[in-house]
Amino acid sequence: MEALQVCQRQTVILPVSLNKKKITPFVGTDAQLESSNLWGRMPGPSCKKRYLGRIRAKCGQSETGSDPVSDVLERRSASDDNPMADMVEIRRQQSLGGYGDGGDGDYDDVFREECGVIGIYGDEEASRLCYLALHALQHRGQEGAGIVTARSGVLKAETGIGLVSDVFNEMKLSQLKGALAIGHVRYATAGASEARNVQPFVAGYRFGSVAVAHNGNLVNYKALRAVLEENGSIFNTSSDTEVVLHLIATSTARPFISRLVDACERLEGAYSLVFLTEEKLVAVRDPHGFRPLVMGRRSNGAVVFASETCALDLIDAEYEREVNPGEVVVVDKDGMSSLCLLPQKQRKSCVFEHIYFALPSSVVFGRSVYESRYEFGQILAEDAPTDCDVVIAVPDSGVVAALGYAAKARLPFQQGLIRSHYVGRTFIEPSQKIRDFGVKLKLAPVHAVLEGKRVVVVDDSIVRGTTSSKIVRLIRDAGAREVHVRIASPPIIGSCYYGVDTPSREQLISHKMTVEQTRKFIGADSLAFLPLARLRRMLGEEAPSYCDACFSGMYPVPPRDVLSAEMAGDGLSNQTMKLPKALNATPGLDPSTTLTGIPDSHPRAPAALS
Ligand code: SF4
């Protein structure tokens, strides 16, 4: 991928001519290329064709080659969107092994959770309990895992790249002694996928040692880091979490808890954090409560904090309550104390936890994830009924919604697709002949269920649309007469800046296409999404306390670090705006709340807000 390597080296990439005048070669980083509006400035098809030819040549692709690059170029040659975003994405996926995941990019065609955290106080088996709990949280991150324990005034850490079962063994766990421990499973959204970025991070400062594990994403990380570096801080990692440790170390407040609060008050964005010192376990949740964090207790009195209740269940800890948004919970030899020291803000819990991230067995933000998904399916059956013979799910995340759909529609639910749980990343080069096997590696169609049938297939969401189109084709190839796709979430029109890895907005199919265009793209006979208004109605009076920014475009915390760069490319300004009238009328939603959002003139805005 020569051109994409060129992007990385930040050298010349686009020696094209514009209206027969030579334009200045474009030099830029990936992000700049992605947001470049050169494509939009090209005057006509012939100029665009030459530009695409250049990219093809640089990538070593033939005119007729069929591969990720050619597919993108073919699609984009007829569109107004800058293909560079997709090109950068291809390189990113290849560096992740994404196309090797069957050669189809399926790995990246879903939202990804950033992390899961666990903290335990008061059990001599703390590291082993952490290890088990991290297994329960493995779905929240598979890139790395770590545990830190405290004993006799010393913090000991063990971290590594890979699954929890790859990182730890009996020998390593036996070294992690102590009754206090925190643990982390990582999926990288901020910071590269390197061993040095695997958490928990441990640091020594003037008054001792502190370790931290973080789930979320700080939207003002770059600004904070710049100030800290200006004042002499030296960073070991490229993760946003490290700034928290520097802020604690440089705070002038006393004692430790005041330093910690002082540091957290400077953070913006999403953070569910667990800290460990030589003698304390501390849990902190950001004032909006974007990411979940719950508290439980074992029968021996040990206190447990975890991202999801499924981790409590596994280690026989009884669920007590959520850590409240803006709350700081301290556990030490004097017992537990709860401090509500962070400024109170409107709660904005991530609704996507209920749609996709959390395990159905968990209770998240006080609601059963299973019940939420079941109801999403029922709403879809009411809202978008269709004549069909059988309801199937895209496993695993579409299963509960499909059960709800089938029950409401009084149709049989069958396992029309079987997921293989043994396929890791395959690292197959994306040569044309084998690319289409990608989805089949993970999903096997059951001919006996599908042949000659009119099929409703329920999935949790559509991100870029590439996987959905392959699934529809798979079902048709297995003999289905009709394929009706039902999506148990509203159309995703915006990226997430609060701890979830999402493609750039340009790559989201629902950002650039209507529902009908999307239906055609994926090749379904019909397509329906869960309407945003129905989702909010289902949440009832809790609706205003949920973030749904990736569906509505209304961002509760301005993602300054990111939006300024992204919006510069397509003429949108990094503006904050008042809620549109329609949303101001939503019961319980604070009309004075200032949000950052897509302008009303955005083509998707009316549909998303309806
Ligand atoms: S933008 Fe979407 S994924 Fe991100 S926190 Fe809000 S609801 Fe969750």
Image (spheres, rainbow, N blue to C red):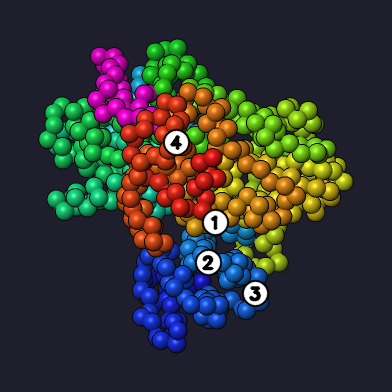
Is tag 4's residue or tag 1's residue first in the polypeptide sequence? 1
Which residue matches tag 3? Answer: 65
Is tag 3's residue or tag 1's residue first in the polypeptide sequence? 3
Which residue matches tag 2? Answer: 80
Q: Secondary structure at mark 4?
A: helix
Residue 282 visible in the displayed image = no
Which residue matches tag 4? Answer: 583
Examine the residues drawn in magenta and state their main secondary structure: loop
Structural distance between the alpha carbons of marks 4 and 2: 30 Å
Looking at the image, is mark 4 or mark 2 nearer the viewer?
4
Looking at the image, is mark 3 or mark 2 nearer the viewer?
2
Residue 370, x across and y down, in percent: 60, 27
Residue at the spot 45% in from the left edge and 26% down from the top edge = 587
Q: Is residue 17 above or below residue 477?
A: below
The amino acid at mark 3 is Gly
The amino acid at mark 2 is Asp
The amino acid at mark 4 is Leu
Q: Is residue 310 above or below residue 169?
A: above
Residue 376, x across and y down, in percent: 62, 32
Quadrant of residue 396 within the rendered picture: top right
